[in-house]
Image: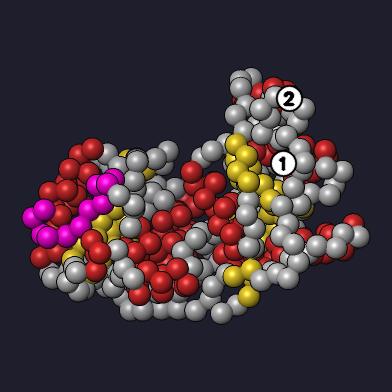
Amino acid sequence: MRRCRAVTEVPALTAWVLTDGKAGDELQALSIAEALGLEAEIRRVKPRPPFSWFMPFGPIDPRERPGAGQSPLAPPFPDIAIASGRRAVPYLRLVKHASGGRTYTVFLKDPRTGPGIADFIWAPSYDRITGPNVLKTLTSPHRITPDRLARARHRPDPRLAALPEPRVAVLVGGDSRHHLFTEDDIARFGDRLSALAAGGATLMMTASRRTPAALRRRLANLAQAEGGFLWDGAGDNPYLDILALADGVVVTADSFNMVGEAAATGVPVLIYEPSGGHPKLAVFLDALKAKGIVHPFEGRLEGTPYKPLNSTFDIATAIAQGVASHRRALGLDRTPRGPERH
């Protein structure tokens, strides 16, 4: 197994995470900063119309220029800026220029403006962007590391520790731009979860803010009837513990991130696809199926263990190497040694 642990014997570099506040974008950027051993400062941009209409092209909202009050770009500029989301593109470009080129800029996912927008770009393998500064991997960066999973298994959430085996994590998303949970989808998904529980599996379920109310009620009824667990929003979300204790993972296909996090466990991942879909999702899932990681969810456990898939280490290592080269070229002393492989 691999984990990301940055080891450095020099003072830490400064870092910004630059997004418009979208949870998925911010989480990926924070995951990379953490893998590099950086304490990143979160900077959120909030461009107004008409400036937001033309992003990722066009200028930033002048109200958020570096010299303006409450600007998300207020200096001093960082050593590293990690950005994600189309609204962050013009702001990352400005940071590079305003820092005199000193800030090493990273953009996560396809910026839609070509590879020249940043010093380093990570994109999922199904995106079209290419370039000498572009790294593409199958799964996205996240915080589900082998170290954290091991610690959670050693001291699990008491709400989960006593649940009988086999235990199955159920990660439920919701309606999105490309997916919709219809009444039929909710009934079908609920029936398959019921069949899984009837077969002897204990369900450890967690829903998201996007989960429709009808689906949430079905999950709650299922937890009560079968003696499983559903995180109802009370206390800390035991998401990591749920993954750590799972003998299998059921995940809805509306979230690339959740599927990628499930693939980091090394246990079979069972996919439920609600109505809708996207060509990129099909490519993504087909690649994971070819590796024997994911299987369609038909109401039963399927598949065998595999080597956990976690791309975060590879992304962080490439960035660390890029930062080191960049700082050497500028004659700067402090450079990260990068993550160690374990």
Between circles 1 and 2, the one closer to the viewer is: 2
The answer to whether one can see residue 58 in this image is no
Q: Secondary structure at mark 1?
A: helix
Identified by mark 1, the residue type is Leu
What residue is at 82 percent from the left and 38 percent from the top?
98
Seen as rendered, the residue at the extreme top is 50
Residue 217 vertical placement versus 124 (above, below): above
Give 2 or 53, whichever is nearer the viewer. Answer: 2
Image-based side of 45 in relation to 287, left or right? right
Please identify the quarter of the rendering in which residue 334 is found.
Answer: bottom right
Residue under label 1: 92
Image-based side of 333 in relation to 142, left or right? right
Residue under label 2: 68
Q: Residues within 10 Å of mark 2 (few under 14, many from 20)?
A: few
Q: Earlier in the sequence, mark 1 or mark 2?
A: 2
The answer to whether one can see residue 149 in this image is yes
Identified by mark 2, the residue type is Ala
Residue 121 vertical placement versus 66 (above, below): below
x and y percentages locating residue 26 in the rendered image: 54, 46
C-alpha gap between disc 1 and disc 2: 17 Å
What residue is at 62 percent from the left and 39 percent from the top?
43
Give 324 or 25, whichever is nearer the viewer. Answer: 324
x and y percentages locating residue 283 in the rendered image: 48, 59
Magenta segment: 224-234
x and y percentages locating residue 190 in the rendered image: 18, 52
